[in-house]
Image (cartoon, coloured by chain):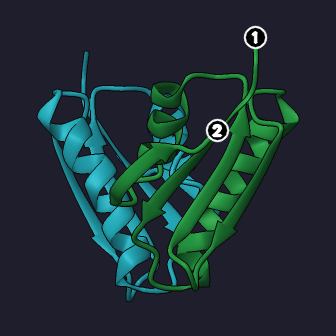
Chain colours: A green, B cyan
Amino acid sequence: MSEHTYKFDVKMSCSGCSGAITRVLTKAKESGGVSEFEVSLEKQEVLVKSKESYDIIREKIAKTGKEIRSGVTIE
Amino acid sequence: MSEHTYKFDVKMSCSGCSGAITRVLTKAKESGGVSEFEVSLEKQEVLVKSKESYDIIREKIAKTGKEIRSGVTIE
């Protein structure tokens, strides 16, 4: 199964907000569901590279309770 | 099955942090898993009343990526 990169616009107000998403994605990386990721508080952006579907990754981020303004598959 | 009240000490830095937990618990309340809850940024405290086990509620909060410093069943 090929990998994709997904980009999400996520509302993050402080480093505690971005840290929460980082913690969740770090766990997902450890368990193999995510191969790479980047969380930027400044850009309000979460980039995720994964073999999983867009919906699965989106749901993982949604479970943090953070508001996802938009999301897109970029490659 | 009887209800219990659980109290968690959760690291929350801003209203975005507490809002994320509120969003997750609101969803849980809508789906019937939680009957009442209270999130206090000031006290760094999350109170949850539920028929579910301590572990299930703890996991729900943990999935937000927030650091849970401690948790206890208070009744």
At label 2, the amino acid type is: Glu
Residue B46 found in image quarter: bottom left
- Mark 2 and mark 1: Cα distance apart in space: 14 Å
| Residue at image point 43% right, 86% down | B14
Which circle's residue, 2 or 1, is located before the other in the chain?
Answer: 1
The residue labelled by disc 2 is A75
**Please, is residue A18 above or below residue A9 in the view?**
below
In the rendered view, does B22 fall on the left or right side of B74? left
Residue B4 found in image quarter: top left
Q: Nearer the viewer, residue A23 or B55?
A: A23
**Please, is residue B19 above or below residue A75 in the view?**
below
Question: Which image quarter is the N terminus of chain B in?
Answer: top left
Q: What chain does mark 1 sit on? A: A
Residue A27 found in image quarter: top right
- Between circles 2 and 1, the one closer to the viewer is 2
In the rendered view, does A6 fall on the left or right side of A50? left
What number is the disc on residue B3?
A: none
In the rendered view, does B27 fall on the left or right side of B11? left
At label 1, the amino acid type is: Met
Q: Secondary structure at mark 2?
A: loop
Residue at the limit of the structure toward the top, as seen here: A1
What number is the disc on residue A1?
A: 1
Q: Position of residue B34 (x, y in %)?
A: 23, 37
How crowded pointer 1 is (Cα within 10 Å; few <14, some 14-19, many 20+) is rated as few
Q: Nearer the viewer, residue A20 or B68?
A: A20
How crowded pointer 2 is (Cα within 10 Å; few <14, some 14-19, many 20+) is rated as few
Asked if both marks, 2 and 1, belong to the same chain, the answer given is yes
